[in-house]
Image: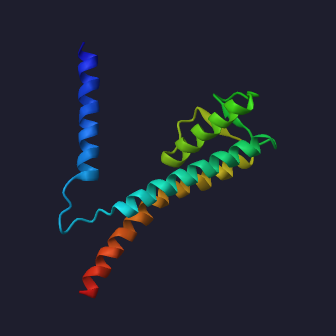
Amino acid sequence: MIAIISILLIIFLLIGSLNAFLFGKVHKRSYFSYEIFYTLLVVYFTVLTSFACLYFVLSFQGVILLDDGKLHRLPPFETLAHSFYFSGVTLMTVGYGDITPIGWGRLLALIESLIGYILPTAFFLKVFQGKNGERLSR
């Protein structure tokens, strides 16, 4: 019973937070930009999908993702699912270590994780640069 109440409370708080973030009052000095936020989401999704497709295609060329340190030959659909999972985890975090790339996949994973770290910084700089440009032009 406590678990159900806790889950419902967490869902309520999550929905409330997202609602306030997306549809709340925008104050005059707010740095939030819907356009840049949605652009960031689209760029993340594009990078994630692109690298997942690279891992998937390269899996047919011998660049394989190891699952729990073991080499598994999986059907194409499962390989695609593993590729998307690995790409998402690599882009959004450092990785969990449950799936490990070998060969050229390691270099791709490094490049993807670097992009994952640089993207938010670049978008925040874009927001602050835009706000400073508005102040200078007034």
Figure quadrant of residue 121? bottom left
Q: Using the image as rendered, state which of residue 100 and residue 59 is in the foreground.
A: 59
- For the N terminus, which image quadrant? top left
Residue 134 place in picture, x, y as percent: 28, 80
Left or right placement of residue 48 versus residue 57 in this view: left
Residue at image point 54% right, 56% down? 114
Q: Nearer the viewer, residue 121 or 15?
A: 15
Whether residue 72 is situated above or below residue 105 in the rendered picture: above
Left or right: where 9 falls relative to 96 = left
Looking at the image, residue 134 lies above or below residue 78: below
Q: Quadrant of residue 130?
A: bottom left
Which residue is at the far front? 23
Residue 79 in picture, x, y percent from top left:
69, 34
Judge by depth and name the residue closer to the eye, 115 or 53.
Answer: 53
Q: Is residue 123 left or right of residue 63?
A: left
Give the colour scheme of this rendering.
Answer: rainbow
Measuring 58% from the left and 53% from the top, which residue is drawn there?
112
Which residue shows up at 51% across the image and 57% down it? 43
> Residue 105 appears at what percent x and percent y?
70, 47
x and y, in percent, of residue 25 in the image:
18, 57
In the figure, residue 29 lies in which quadrant?
bottom left
Vertical order, 137 against 46 (above or below): below
Q: Farthest residue to the bottom: give it.
A: 137
Give the tally of numbered discs: 0
Residue at the right extreme, as displayed: 61
The quadrant of the picture occupied by the C terminus is: bottom left
Task: Kindly identify the residue that appears in the image at 57 percent across and 35 percent down.
Answer: 97
